[in-house]
Amino acid sequence: MYDTIIIGAGMSGLAAGIRLAYYEQRVCILERHYTIGGLNSFYRLRGRDYDVGLHALTNVTPKGTKTGPLARLLRQLRMKWEDFAISPQIGSEIAFPSARLRFDNETDTLRDEVARAFPQQVENFDRLAREIVEYDDLSEKHANLSARLVVGSIITEPLLVEMLFCPLMFYGSAREHDMDWGQFSIMFRSIFLEGLGRPQAGVRLILKHLVRKFRALGGELKLRAGVKQLAVDGDRVTRVVLENDEVLEARNVVSSAGWCETMRLCDDGHPVVNSRAPGQLTFCETIATLDAQPRDLGHDRTITFFNDHDKFIWQKPDGLCDVRSGVICSPNNFAYNEPLDDGTIRITALANFDRWRDLNEDAYRLEKLRWYDRITESAVRFIPDYRSRVIDTDMFTPATVVRFTGHDNGAVYGAPDKQLDGTTHLKNLFICGTDQGFVGIIGSITSGIAMANLHCLRGEATA
Amino acid sequence: MNAAEIREEVLDILSDIAPDEDLSQLDDDKRFREQLELDSMDFLDIVMELRKRHRIQIAEDDYINLASMSSTVAYLEPLMKDIEREKV
């Protein structure tokens, strides 16, 4: 009998596991895949290391900062700032046909850029920033307001509105067309007011630290241990049945598998689809390895968010991909002490899971090649054309995301409606991770910590 | 433990929870929240650390007693009077 079983060894599951093991619970993390990471993971291909998932950590604040999500999660995990070894971004850019805005980890940079490109809007921008700083993410008041309504009522230049939404939606909006004002404020702070960074060794460094810590505290991690069923009796999960028919028991179960995905595991016939609309937004990503550092080819931006017309469209595309917009990331362009060996450019574009799923094997392979070229062709309108310097490539599609993470539709930001308190229809089953409410690396770690605290530690302290 | 020892123990817990805080200037009668960058998650850790280190159970309704150093020590004194402080 475990105190807590956690489904999924991604950022949120590992963080929850550390909290519970630290406070002497018997914890087991079950991971279906043969490796850890989930939506933020890594792999090795033809002798090179690759990251998948987010391009960068958000919420990056300097060492010694006492407030903010990064400082809080380090405290909660009893980890040091150095454990994450985060190097800040060099600087990023929002690129539209008629304007460009740069930003970096200095709060004033974006403001100065707005003043340069939209001098009439500076005061409005300041007002928006003030509203966002004052927004209390714990009170949930006004959280469900339309961000487009709020921002549109403050910023009166539509192009600037679109340019501000573009990076925030790409980095975390599970909802098409619009965001909740609460989510917009949190994302604005984490990207524009705090900042972006990455460990030189990539996301694997963070995952390895989390696993090492979890195991050192006595936590148990089972890989290739997919959950087949959560056996329900009355209002509780009584047994966790694995795909190999092994049966485990725990007082509490915390699942990072996603809301609909977790409901499907329960054998009590609880409605799955009607309980929540699944997410639809997913991506293709191209990865190019170059024989030079991007900087030497004239590209020094860390992340470039591009959109080729003045209106930013955030919705599931009709075709296989939507290449009108995208995110270009060069992992080389962070302020590391040592440069990375290879040059790398990753480009992310919106994609349609159903279309990719319906292809037969030959067509899938062909379309992957075709869309690799189209996505790259679209991106090099906004950065120097690096195509003659490519020495290796890879690409993932929504089908790849589903295969490796088990998340419906490959929806990387989960369902549009979140379960902020993590509760379900069962008294000892809780969800954490993407469908609980926070996204990104820092967001998912925070989610795991918060749900472990709220449901597995708080009440337990007196049990 | 006597009141002074309990105070030392709570300081030790605080430095474990928030290693970047300077605790030497702590005003015992002022709320922790007003002088330290602690949020509700960190407050839970005071409770959890007391439980982990000394097997002291604190009911959720009593968390309010942990607002400042002096109220914490006063609340813990009867609960910890039979506990020996480990030499660090």
Image (cartoon, coloured by chain):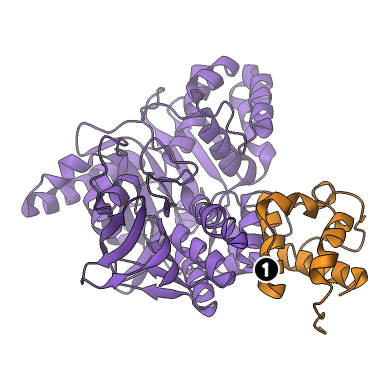
Q: Say which colour chain B has.
A: orange
Q: Can residue A291 be seen here?
A: no
Q: Can residue A387 be seen here?
A: yes
From this view, report whether residue A146 is shown above or below residue A409: above
Q: Which residue is mark 1?
A: B51
Q: Say which colour chain A has.
A: purple
Return the residue nearer the eye: A270 or A210.
Answer: A270
Q: Number of marks in the image?
A: 1
For the point 50% across and 27% down, which residue is it? A144
Return the residue nearer the eye: B18 or A452.
Answer: A452
Q: Position of residue B77 (x, y in %)?
A: 85, 66
Return the residue nearer the eye: B17 or A389.
Answer: B17
Question: What is the chain identity of the residue bearing mark 1?
Answer: B
For badge 1, the amino acid type reads Arg
Q: Position of residue A420 (x, y in %)?
A: 49, 41
From this view, report whether residue A27 is shown above or below residue A325: below
Q: Position of residue A406 (x, y in %)?
A: 27, 55
